[in-house]
């Protein structure tokens, strides 16, 4: 099947705001230990103005010590200045990181809006996989893998296989677009069903329980609703930015990122 | 009940209008006036923008990568010759209206242009011809094309029933067979009945005017009702003969008569003047189509735009279900490119020539010959053509030809409408049962007659225009559905 499911998440970049308490609670999350992360690199981007670089350095240094004490992973930190999303994306690329992990705490509306916009920009700009980790998520029992059977979804398949080592239940969901007539729609359903079976067959070695869902409609809306209905812990999906409408309105991943309550992993 | 739900509900609504029109024409007038004012004042710009969008959409489709797709199976050939096809296109889409407005519209604009322009000036004459071209040119046909192309595509290429709801399968799925689909079809039927009944009423009035001028038959309501009754019998007969023999034969015959009438006008009229009007107006039209398409005169007299351009756009949209279904039916086997170019250009050019010949001659008489008939013609537009023909030798013969043309256009329009209404209310049966054709034929004639007696014909016209607003939205969604279908041409087939 050609899937490489080992060691795909060794080196992780974690952009942080100074008031984010993700690191303090790192032992209460499913994230670091189970994923076998070897190295965390914390990044804080100063916005200019009254920002205090020394204070930021001091806080991040404390966070690095906490990681070293709490996990088996190594850690480093960096404070830069500039446009947050651009800095995050460039750092991820230059440092050959396997993942950008954005801890999201929905503390207040304003912060959520600011974080939301940076997150969306990172998703749009980066070629590195992004994990938006919704804080408070303690377990990783159910994962939803949304696929359009396209190239981007195929890339995400490796990560889904990898996650099978630390989670128990996988739901594979395909959201299709209704064909133009009933006969074509019947064939579309058949093709979707065959492809879902094929995906399930590929992932079976890594998972104990796999369910499949085939739906119709607007992908962002249907996936968000499924995530809620099945109380999933993590949504995994690929991101393709082809097509004029996607370029104008944003990809499905961008639309879902700020609305979904569970964590989400986006593989470009 | 479910099998005939569209038929039962729509005929009930139409009969309700007949009753209201008969017993309380004032109520119908109040409701229609309110809706008309609200829609045209608040949403008129939507009609403007939508008509332009439809034109751009058609051009992109014709010259884009989907142009080679055939409206039928890949190896199908067109069912009708070019002449037969153009004749039927012209007869269904424009026919009766052109005879009615060919003289009256240019004269109306010449006498009553927008507020910023002097009436009876050279400028207003050029404006009159340019805007007559504009109102009867590419945009109306683009409106029809959107409707007919979507219908033809989903019917003949996707094997779905020839119903407007079928075009919504990509968006609605199997719901096209339930309430949402029924609502779309009922709305289409009602817009068609209102639009056709109004045209029949106005057409009957014009035939009455012609007969009065020719033979002194009083131009009274009683005689107009008799005209409607005679024409009803004729079109029901034509309808029974069928599309291939009935409508096509009549359309071809009428096309010959119309072309003959046009040639006579070109010969006996001011030939050189007519061709000068034609090429000048064509040049101005081509040069200013973008500006006219988006011009609502917000600073110089929006009222003019409301009462003419917006009225026409709404009117073409209200007619679109009927003409669209009919045009789709006769266009099977043509490629999208051939269909769009043929439908967009051939009838438009003929229409321009018609306006140049009849409108141009009327302006010639008024401007050059100081004939002084324009005000009378504009005051009673149904007499405009006959008043103009009075200035030519053999005017009685020419007026008789005009009356015959009107009668046949009347018959072909009503015949096509009866056929289409029968089809729409028989779940898309291409050979609708005779009982339904009779029911619709009698209903639309009764509606026209009753409202002519009660004075509710204009109210009905306003209702048709009001119905065009939801239909504009439906048509924009049809464009989306059509693109979805075309984009998936090679998938799942």
Image (cartoon, coloured by chain):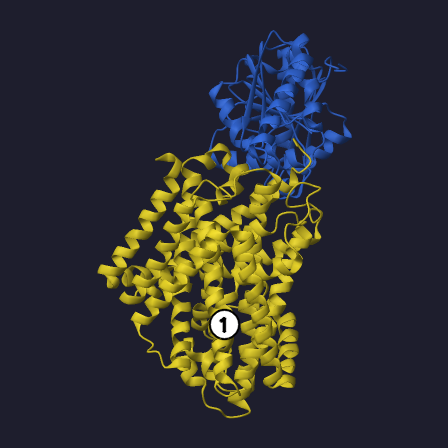
Chain colours: A blue, B yellow
The kind of secondary structure element at disc 1 is helix
Residues packed near mark 1 inside 10 Å, few (<14), some (14 to 19) or many (20 plus): many
Q: Is residue B75 toward the left or the right of residue B368 in the image?
A: right
Q: Can you give x and y, in whole percent of width and height, for residue A215 in the image? A: 54, 25
Which residue shows up at 45% across the image and 73% down it? B304
Q: Quadrant of the C terminus of chain B?
A: top right
Which residue shows up at 60% across the image and 58% down it? B55
Q: Tell me if residue A17 can be seen.
A: no
Q: Is residue B334 toward the left or the right of residue B374 in the image?
A: right
Dividing the picture into quadrants, the one containing residue B193 is bottom left
Q: Quadrant of the N terminus of chain B?
A: top left
Q: Can you give x and y, in whole percent of width and height, for residue B61 in the image? A: 66, 51
- Residue farthest left in this picture: B23
> Which of B183/B300 is in front?
B183
> Which of A84/B79 is in front?
B79
Residue B28 drawn above or below residue B154 = below
Residue A143 drawn above or below residue B301 = above
Q: Tell me if residue B322 can be seen.
A: yes
Q: Which residue is mark 1?
A: B99
> Which of B83/A252 is in front?
B83
Which residue shows up at 42% across the image and 44% down it? B425
Residue B355 drawn above or below residue B366 = above
């Amino acid at each position: 099947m050609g899937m490489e499911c080992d060691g795909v998440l060794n080196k992780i970049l974690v952009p942080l705001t100074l008031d984010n308490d993700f690191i303090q609670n790192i032992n209460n999350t499913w994230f670091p230990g189970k994923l076998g992360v070897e190295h965390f690199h914390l990044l804080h981007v100063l916005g200019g103005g009254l920002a205090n670089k020394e204070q930021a350095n001091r806080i991040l240094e404390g966070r690095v010590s906490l990681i070293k004490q709490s996990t088996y992973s190594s850690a480093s930190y960096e404070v830069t200045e500039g446009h947050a999303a651009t800095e995050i994306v460039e750092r991820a690329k230059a440092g050959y990181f396997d993942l950008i992990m954005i801890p999201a705490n929905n503390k207040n509306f304003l912060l959520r809006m600011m974080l939301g916009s940076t997150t969306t920009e990172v998703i749009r700009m980066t070629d590195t996989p992004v994990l938006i980790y919704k804080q408070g998520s303690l377990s990783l029992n159910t994962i939803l893998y949304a696929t359009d059977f396209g190239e981007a979804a195929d890339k995400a398949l490796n990560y889904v296989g990898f996650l099978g080592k630390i989670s128990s239940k996988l739901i594979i969901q395909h959201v299709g677009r209704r064909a133009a007539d009933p006969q074509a729609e019947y064939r579309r359903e058949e093709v979707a069903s065959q492809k879902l079976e094929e995906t399930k067959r590929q992932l079976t070695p890594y998972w104990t329980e796999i369910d499949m869902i085939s739906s119709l409609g607007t992908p962002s809306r249907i996936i968000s609703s499924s995530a809620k209905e099945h109380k999933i812990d993590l949504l995994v999906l690929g991101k393709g930015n082809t097509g004029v409408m996607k370029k104008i309105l944003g990809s499905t991943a961008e639309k879902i990122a700020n609305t979904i309550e569970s964590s989400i992993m986006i593989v470009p | 009940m479910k099998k005939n739900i569209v038929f039962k509900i729509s005929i009930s609504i139409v009969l309700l209008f007949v009753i209201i029109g008969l017993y309380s024409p004032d109520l119908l007038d109040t409701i229609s006036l309110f809706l008309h004012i609200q829609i045209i004042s608040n949403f008129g710009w939507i009609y403007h923008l939508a008509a332009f969008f439809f034109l751009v959409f058609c051009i992109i489709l014709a010259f884009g990568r989907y142009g080679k797709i055939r409206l039928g199976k890949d190896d199908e050939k067109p069912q009708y010759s070019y002449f037969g096809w153009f004749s039927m296109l012209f007869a269904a889409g424009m026919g009766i209206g052109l005879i009615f407005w060919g003289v009256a519209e240019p004269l109306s604009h010449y006498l009553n242009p927008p507020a910023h322009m002097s009436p009876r000036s050279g400028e207003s004459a050029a404006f009159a011809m340019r805007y007559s071209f504009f109102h009867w040119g590419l945009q109306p046909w683009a409106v029809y094309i959107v409707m007919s192309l979507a219908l033809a595509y989903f019917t003949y290429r996707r094997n779905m029933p020839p119903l407007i709801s079928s075009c919504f399968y990509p968006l609605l799925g199997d719901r096209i067979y339930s309430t949402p689909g029924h609502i779309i079809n009922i709305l289409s039927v009602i817009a068609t009945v209102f639009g056709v009944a109004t045209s029949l009423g106005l057409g009957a009035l014009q035939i009455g005017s012609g007969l009065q001028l020719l033979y002194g038959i009083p131009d009274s309501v009683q005689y107009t009702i008799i005209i409607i009754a005679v024409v009803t019998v004729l079109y029901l007969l034509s309808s029974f003969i069928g599309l291939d023999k009935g409508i096509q034969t009549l359309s071809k015959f009428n096309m010959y008569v119309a072309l003959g009438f046009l040639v006579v006008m070109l010969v006996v009229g001011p030939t050189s003047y007519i061709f000068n009007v034609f090429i000048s107006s064509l040049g101005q039209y081509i040069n200013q189509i973008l500006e006219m398409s988006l011009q609502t005169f917000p600073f110089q007299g929006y009222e003019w735009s409301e009462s003419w351009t917006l009225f026409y756009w709404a009117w073409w949209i209200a007619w679109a279900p009927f003409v669209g279904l009919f045009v789709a039916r006769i266009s099977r086997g043509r490629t999208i490119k051939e269909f769009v170019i043929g439908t967009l250009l051939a009838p438009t050019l003929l229409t321009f020539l018609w306006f140049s010949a009849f409108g141009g001659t009327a302006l010639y008489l008024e401007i050059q010959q100081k004939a002084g008939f324009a005000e009378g013609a504009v005051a009673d537009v149904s007499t405009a053509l006959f008043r103009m023909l009075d200035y030519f030798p053999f005017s009685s013969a020419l007026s008789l030809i005009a009356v015959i043309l009107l009668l046949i256009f009347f018959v072909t329009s009503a015949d096509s409408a009866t056929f289409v209404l029968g089809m729409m209310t028989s779940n898309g049966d291409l050979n609708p049962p005779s009982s339904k054709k009779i029911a619709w034929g009698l209903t639309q004639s009764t509606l026209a007659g009753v409202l002519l007696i009660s004075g509710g014909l204009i109210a009905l016209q306003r209702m048709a225009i009001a119905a065009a607003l939801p239909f504009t939205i439906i048509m924009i969604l049809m464009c989306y559905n059509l693109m979805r279908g075309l984009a998936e041409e090679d998938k799942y087939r």
